[in-house]
Amino acid sequence: MQIPDIKKRLPIMSVLAHYGIKMNKNDHIICPFHKDDKPSCKIYTDTNTYNCFGCRKTGDVIQFIQDKENCNKHAALKIATELANGGTTENNQNTEVMGISSGKASVKEAENFAELFNRQKDGLPRSHKAQEYLKNRGLEQLQEVGYNSGVNWKKLKQCITFPLKDKSGNIVSLYGRRITESNGYNAEFGKHYYTENRKGLYPGCPDANTETLIITEAIIDCASLQLVINNEQLAMKGISVLTAYGTNGLTAEHIEAIKQLKNLQEIIFFFDGDIAGKEGIIKSTEKLQHLKCKITAVPTPDGEDVNSMFITYGKEAILQLIEERQPANPESNQSSGNQINIPIEVQTQCIASQRLKTDLPNKIIHQTPTARYIIKGTLPKTFDRMLVSLDVQHLETAIKYRCRLDLYEEKQTRKEAREASEKLDLRSDLVENDLSELTDLLEEYRDNQLQQITEENSNDKALRLPEQAKCKAFLQKEDLIQNLNELIGQSGIVGEENNRLFLFIIGTSHKMKDTLHALIQGSSGSGKTHLLSKIAALMPSERVVKFTRVTENSFYNYDEYYFQGKLVCLEDIDGLKEEALFAWRELISNEQLSSSTSQKDENGNIRSAQRIVRGPMASICATTHGQIYEDNMSCMFIVAVDESSEQTQKIMNYQSKTASGTIEKKLEVEAKEFLQNSIRMLKPLKVINPYADKIKLPPQAHKIRRLHELFLSFVKQVALIHQYQRKRDDRGRIITDPEDLKIAVEIMFDSIFLKVDELDGSLRQFFEQLKAYVLAKENPQNYEFMQREIRHSLNLSKSATHRYLNNLLELEYLSVTGGYQNKGLRYKVSYWDNVVKLREQIKEYLNNQLDKL
């Protein structure tokens, strides 16, 4: 039973009756915690709390028991549990000893438990109820399990049974779990029983060569875990499983068996996800703190156990949770390098009484022995004031004093405390002390709230266990890059097979320390903004920031960590002014913006101050001008949109299928959500690349230093995407595989080539189309054409054609052969480069190096 359940089921009047304490007509009692001549302790039956105006003790029913018994919290909880259950004590496993029916002799030590268990195993196939129970528990494949229909013991009747073994492997005791009621005996469904003088371990003493030992809370959980990893696999990996007999059931026999494991390196506790389970881990860890091995705990979700998760989520979810285990050693063992991580919920729920009641977002309550203080509305988010609307309420008369004050103003606070005291007939010094304490509590609460908001903005959305397991299994598959590309296509991105994969990998770097940036380049209407939006939609929504327009100084005015760990998308940077472009470049290259601003100090005087906006963040933006990249964005990858007729046809076919209902939009949404979840599973780990000096980029590339840095960063991101497959060194760093370099070269080859080619992406596509058109004519070397002819033949706009022709003229790829400026010029191709041959040469240059890795 959890603490909230105990409080709900145990009224304070029952506690008073238990101790023989009577309450007068004014709901007061003679305080049992100090010498009290007249009743000074007020009982609040509506809130199930008490408050003594004499000794100042206050709290709930559990705190009352703790004060009365002068005991610790754990002991008080045991008494409260007993009282809440009507005076009958239950331990956390609800366990009883398996006795015999009235009038029969006890089970003798000489009883052959092996023969008895074998009979019970034989009886299992004859019971439909037992088989159905095992099936519902996911344990139908379990080998060592029996069923007793009630031949031997009354309390063992209709129990699934499991053998407990000694160090020699002999069955020396039995455990039974009731699966139904029998003979009118009102047994709780699923109750636990052991034979008298219980001994032995389940499933037996761990193998002598055990390196990793997983300890569960219950036998059913341990049986489930054996099915997750079969016995042969356990032995091969040096893993053994063992069950404790409840949260306090780590016996001397358990400890002795664990001490005999000479190769033991780690103990993993896999207890239930309730408070008792988490406290049980702490207590069990204390018993093993003398061992020289690492002790960890699996973060079991609230309300779950191994068996329930095995049934609901399957094998992969269990393995995923084990991988996410955390240190769980007591503080007393910190000298050996171990540390404890007591769950926050345990710490919170073990507090005797909450100092602030924050159930309602716009009504914060703080109660002291003097008065009740109610804060209405929200707290200011700025740290230079604590302006609140405050009600001070008398505890007995409920009369209120209302005011609005800044708790940071000492004089104002003292004045309001004095006036509240006069109205409510309270001591002003006590009220003033309460307000001082309230200020500290509100500061702490506000800080925690702001930190929580920051974490929610920066952290990934939590995934459920089946989602984690499914994504992890996907990330472990071979041909991961190919599978990712197929999913990207299924999400609704048509064609652009290489570009979409390139941009997707760049986008995934947003949560890493070393982020990547891309510039999508294409003519107006080429689909560059559409491609950007589609890629952004594949990233976790909590990590994406999109802008259509940015003013000159807007980047400087964001909160300090707003962009950190985000993917920032600019739909069109052509319209950005120079100041905005400068700020953007600084955020990318230096990972922060720093500006001087003016603000008031605590005395109201204007002072200069520094304002900082920090990265790192990843970014993807779009433009129609290739030269923007060269002039301002030298640290970005350039991606040229596919403007070919084949790509246009693919898009049109997709649009037709969508309109006709052929394409299932539901499947697109599922693919998109799965990719988002897979990205959420990636962790910002460190990467080392032992092959970094083995690949050299083409020497004719422009700004080769910057390009080489970008290439190595992209290789690192490819390795990070394969993090569930790659090896790690002794420091936990991912080791790059030669396959990562091959993938990186293949995906970003076009980007590398664009750094060799003096024509930008869209201009190169136009020139190749133009050459193909001219080569189809007679005598192409001397063929002359006009702008209108090319515009109509290549199906381009007038402005785009004009821009491309002028750029090619400037670069001397074309020459003017005649015509007039106002009537139209005539052109011909003057420089016939062989881009296909150049691409092949560069690819061969890179592949020759890759083959030697």
Image (tube, rainbow, N blue to C red):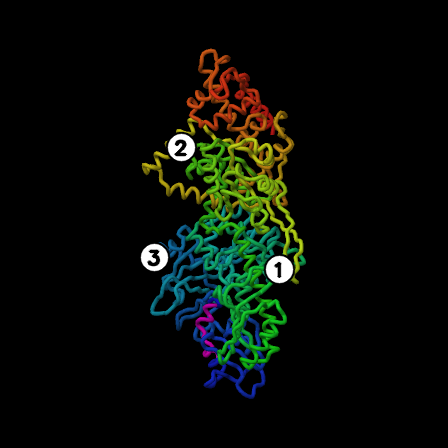
Q: Residue at x 58, y 85 (%)?
A: 35
The label number, if any, that marks residue 127 in the structure image: 3
Which residue: 55% across, 56% down? 297
Amino acid tagged 3 = Ser
* Quarter holding residue 602: bottom right
| Residue closer to the observer: 278 or 620 | 620
Camera-nearest residue between 824 and 215: 824
Give the residue at mark 1.
289
User: Tag 2 or tag 1, which sits nearer the N-term?
Assistant: 1
Write down the quadrant of residue 653 in the picture: top left
Q: Amino acid at mark 1?
A: Gln
Q: Which residue is mark 2?
A: 651
Question: Residue 372: x percent and y percent?
Answer: 53, 74
Say whether marks 2 and 3 touch (CB < 8 Å): no
130 left or right, relative to 336: left
**Majority secondary structure of the magenta segment?**
helix
Against 779, residue 215 (above or below) is below
> What residue is shown at x 48% (from left), y 14% (from top)?
783
Residue 543 image point, x, y percent: 51, 47
Q: Does the rendering let one see residue 381?
A: yes
Spatial CA distance of label 1 from label 2 is 64 Å
**Magenta stretch in the rendered image:** 4-15
- Residue 744, percent across and down? 55, 33
Q: Nearer the viewer, mark 2 or mark 3?
A: 2
Quadrant that contains the C terminus: top right
Element on which disc 3 rests: loop
In the image, residue 376 sits, relative to residue 271, either above or below, namely below
Q: Amino acid at mark 2?
A: Ile
Q: Residue furthest left?
A: 660
Residue 158 placement, left or right of 427: left
Tell me if residue 142 is in the magenta stretch.
no
Residue 34: give x, y in percent of width and height: 58, 83
